[in-house]
């Protein structure tokens, strides 16, 4: 049906957290370059958390916190303007805590960028709760800036593909590659040991499963190519016993690694990242973009409604 035809996504604006740390400064400059590639505005946000602090801090302390946050934003904006003088940019001093501040600034369209190391705030080391919370609970794509800032470009965006249901967010990875004038490498990691015991005649049936996996990825690549006919799209199936290990290795040869998040619920009801995403975010050699399932699904629903109106 016509409404099932995949549509080309538009990349939104970019929101980046500022906390004065080295990791946040790297994230700010990466976010500025990303906004420039997209032709979209950049929003610098510092979460002063003054709403919560007001419960136990004096007025003088709160004013000091606000002034420090303002200075950080001025410094970050100056660094951006030096490299991207024509980039549309705004700054925001939020009264909220980091996760809420970023979510509010991003609304429903922007991409959030955070650093992998920091002082607390937005760029907290992802072993902590704040960084993981931003990725796990955001309703928009989140990029965690990892790797060396002066690392040579590879001209490749790698998408970590699980199956045919990934098409919606995979189109965002294709848009990222197109904006970079890069190629898209679709990588599916097939863990052979995960199928042992599920098949009756191991060797013959495993060969059949492998062929089906390869064909599924090729079909998915054809659909992406149909939406982005000028983009170089190459599907790859890797075998191994560690999916996170294979993705981390692949990240050493990519400018950006894009993943769809497969979230699970903790006993208290909050979403948590799956094991693969958690491991990749700790060890990847390049920036990692995580696309929440709800974002891709909502984008496609809007596209279908617009197509039928």
Image (tube, rainbow, N blue to C red):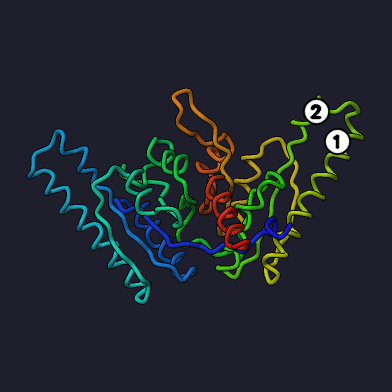
Question: Is 189 placed above or below 268 here?
Answer: below
Q: Are marks 1 and 2 in contact (CB under 8 Å)?
A: yes
Label disc, if present, on residue 156 of the rendered structure: none
Image quadrant in which the N terminus is located:
bottom right
- Position of 218 with respect to 70 (left or right) is right
Q: Tell me the distance, in whole angstroms, between the alpha carbons under discs 1 and 2.
A: 8 Å
Q: Check disc 1: other Cα within 10 Å, few if <14, some if 14-19, many if 20+.
A: some
Label whose residue precedes the other's in the sequence (1 or 2): 2
Quarter of the image for residue 99 reads top left
Question: Is 267 placed above or below 294 here?
Answer: above
| Number of on-image labels | 2
Q: Position of residue 203 (x, y in %)?
A: 90, 33
Furthest-front residue in view?
309
The local secondary structure at tag 1 comes to helix
Which residue corresponds to mark 2? 196
The local secondary structure at tag 2 comes to loop
**Does residue 29 appear in this view?**
yes
Q: Position of residue 207 (x, y in %)?
A: 88, 39
- Position of 57 with respect to 203 (left or right) is left
Quarter of the image for residue 193 reads top right
Image quadrant in which the C terminus is located:
bottom right
Label disc, if present, on residue 206 of the rendered structure: 1
Residue displayed at 71% across by 35% down: 241
Depth check: give the residue in front, 224 or 275. 224
Q: Check disc 2: other Cα within 10 Å, few if <14, some if 14-19, many if 20+.
A: some
**Does residue 176 appear in this view?**
no
Q: Position of residue 137 (x, y in %)?
A: 45, 40
Q: Position of residue 83 (x, y in %)?
A: 37, 72
Residue displayed at 68% across by 46% down: 165
């Amino acid at each position: 049906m016509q409404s099932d035809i995949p549509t080309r996504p538009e990349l939104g604006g970019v929101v980046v957290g500022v906390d004065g740390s080295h990791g946040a400064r790297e994230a700010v400059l990466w976010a500025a370059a990303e906004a420039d590639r997209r032709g979209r505005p950049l929003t610098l946000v510092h979460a002063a958390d003054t709403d919560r602090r007001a419960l136990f801090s004096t007025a003088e302390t709160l004013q000091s916190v606000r002034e420090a946050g303002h200075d950080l934003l001025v410094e970050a904006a100056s660094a951006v303007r030096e490299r991207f003088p024509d980039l549309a940019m705004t700054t925001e001093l939020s009264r909220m805590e980091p996760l809420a501040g970023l979510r509010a600034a991003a609304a429903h369209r922007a991409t959030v960028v955070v650093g992998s190391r920091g002082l607390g705030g937005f760029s907290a080391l992802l072993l902590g709760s704040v960084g993981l919370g931003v990725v796990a609970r955001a309703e928009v794509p989140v990029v965690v800036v990892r790797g060396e800032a002066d690392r040579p470009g590879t001209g490749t965006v790698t998408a970590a593909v699980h199956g045919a249901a990934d098409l919606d967010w995979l189109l965002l990875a294709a848009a990222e590659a197109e904006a970079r004038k890069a190629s898209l490498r679709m990588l599916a990691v097939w863990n052979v040991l995960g199928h042992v015991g599920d098949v009756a005649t191991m060797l013959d049936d495993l060969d059949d499963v492998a062929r089906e996996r390869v064909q599924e990825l090729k079909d998915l690549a054809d659909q992406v190519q149909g939406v982005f006919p000028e983009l170089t799209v190459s599907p790859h199936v890797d075998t191994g016993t560690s999916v996170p290990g294979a993705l981390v290795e692949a990240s050493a040869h990519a400018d950006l690694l894009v993943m769809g998040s497969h979230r699970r619920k903790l006993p208290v009801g909050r979403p948590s990242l799956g094991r693969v995403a958690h491991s990749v975010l700790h060890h990847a050699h390049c920036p990692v973009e995580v696309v929440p399932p709800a974002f891709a699904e909502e984008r496609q629903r809007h596209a279908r409604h617009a197509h039928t109106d």
